[in-house]
Amino acid sequence: FPFMAGAGQPVNAAFFLQYDSLGQELVSLTGVESALQDARSSLALSTKKHKQVTSEIHKNEKKQDHHVEKIDKCEHHCFYSSSLLQPHLLCSGGVAGRLERQQAKLEALRDAAPPLRSREKKLREDDIPALQKKVSNLANATEHKEEVSKQRHAMFEGAVAGSPSQLLQALHAAVGSWKAALNLELQIQQGMQVVSSYCRQAQQLFHEAQGLLGSALQVNRGAQINNALDGNEFIERMQQEQRNHQVRAAQEAVSRGAQTLQMAFSQIPPQLAQRHPEAAAGLGQVHLPIFNQADVGNYVLEIFGGDMGDLIAGMNMAAKIHENLNMVQEALGVIAHQVAIVDALMVAIGVAAGQRQQGLSEEESKLATEKQRIFEQLRAQALGAAAPMARPIPAAPIAQAYTERAAAAVPIAQPTAQPTAQPTAQPLAQPTAQLVQPTAQPFAQPTAQPVQPTAQQAVMAQPVAQPAVQQTAQPTAQPVTAAPTIHAEPLPRTSTQEFLIQVPAGTGAGHAVQVTSPNTGKMVQVVIPQGVQPGDTLKVLG
């Protein structure tokens, strides 16, 4: 045989008979997965019930032992058997009454024990083993189904691989190129997600530094007020130290933010600039601030300069804090710009990945079509031209390898609103009804003429008022929308305008008439509803 599948298996009539037999076996195993899941759920439920029943049996036995012990004490104990020594029992019948109550409780527990043991035995010996066997059988069937599916797939792929066409090879190459392009885009997307996360962490740290500087400015203002009022020197010193600590904490936050930002830029994929040069322009170009802190001169003025030295040092520190706040604000603007670039890149990468995914799906669909075409050709050659074909041989597709132009030409599906039809009004006196002889049920063939109706009826033959028609040079119809329409089997139509017909003589309820719609020019079959008499007017949608 010219064609071979698998390990030297000839692609002949026996091959396709085996292939179809495996397909029928797969059909017979349809639903085993859901059945296995249901069986496992039932087994778990029965196991849970068995544990509950076993627990109830243990509780019952424990309570029985408790009441047996109480009864023994009431009968033989030197203290609990005497009513005189237990005056609190005199109002409830004494020891005799207590003994009677304990015996009644014990009897009730003994009566409840056999049903519990019977339920436990049924679950342990019947239900659970049966469900375990069912689960085992279904698990084996599921495994067998997977093996059959793999074998059938291997036969299909082996037969196709044994007779490759030039188109099949071209489609394999096209699928590989689209996969490579998609994987590259996904790698860039994954790297940019890390960059985006680091940029936002850096932005949060700079916001933290901004808050610390604002708090330090408030503390410094309090220290200046305390110095002007000649307040407590210790409190003023504590305020100055708190201010310096907050400025240092802000600097640490800025340093961590700068390191995080540098880490973000180090994670930028090297292919990004090549794939998205315009969107990536400006990414990684930042200027990081260097804070001004309290120097030795400020400390000397605050320690040895007295009130005047504290005043000068506080003013100098306030100016430095304002300058630091301005630098942080500028840095936040730069980081916000970087975050905006990253977000724009993520959108562009998502669109590009979507285009490549859609292109890959199209090429994989073409590949599957070509494989099926080759397989059906092999089937026709093996079984002969006279053999019945279960499926027609599909047409050969066209391979489209990945290129930038091909990827850009792949449209991304966007939901669009469907426009609604705008009906146009037609004159009421225009429609003409022509009655034809139906083939299903015979009836008399009357002639229907257009009329100016004075009353019209709907499905249930409910009379409704006839809308007035203004006779002008261009007559227009006032469509009636409140009344229901008759039950009909209309032909396909493109308009929903209403028109009126008069029921011809010789027809009645249940008869079918055919009329030509004045709106579409097509034939419409109308069934006369119950309660409608010849000469009445019907409203029809057409």
Image (cartoon, helix red, strand yellow):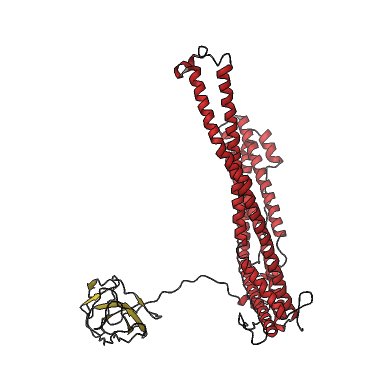
Q: Quadrant of the C terminus?
A: bottom left
| Residue 329 in the image: above or below residue 64 | below
Q: Which quadrant of the view contains residue 335?
A: bottom right
- Quick one: 181 or 447, which is closer to the camera? 447
Which residue is located at x 62 percent, y 35 percent?
A: 239
Describe residue 223's horizontal placement relative to residue 484 as left or right.
right
As drawn, the residue found furthest toward the top would be 84
State the residue in front, 421 or 272: 421
Q: Is residue 304 visible?
A: no
The N terminus - image quarter: bottom right
Q: Is residue 160 left or right of residue 315?
A: right
Residue 22 x, y percent position in the rendering = 67, 71
Question: Residue 452: x percent and y percent?
Answer: 22, 82
In terms of depth relative to the viewer, which is nearer, 142 or 474?
142
Farthest residue to the right: give it.
8
What residue is drawn where x is 58% and y is 44%? 49
Dividing the picture into quadrants, the one containing residue 309 is top right
Which residue in the rendered view is the most extreme toward the left? 454
Of residue 82 and residue 356, the one placed in the foreground of this image is 82
Hey, which quadrant is residue 525 in on the image? bottom left
The picture places residue 175, in percent across and down from the top left corner, at 69, 75
Where is 254 relative to 471, above or below? above
**Residue 495: image location, x then y, percent:** 37, 79
Left or right of residue 506, residue 14 in this image: right
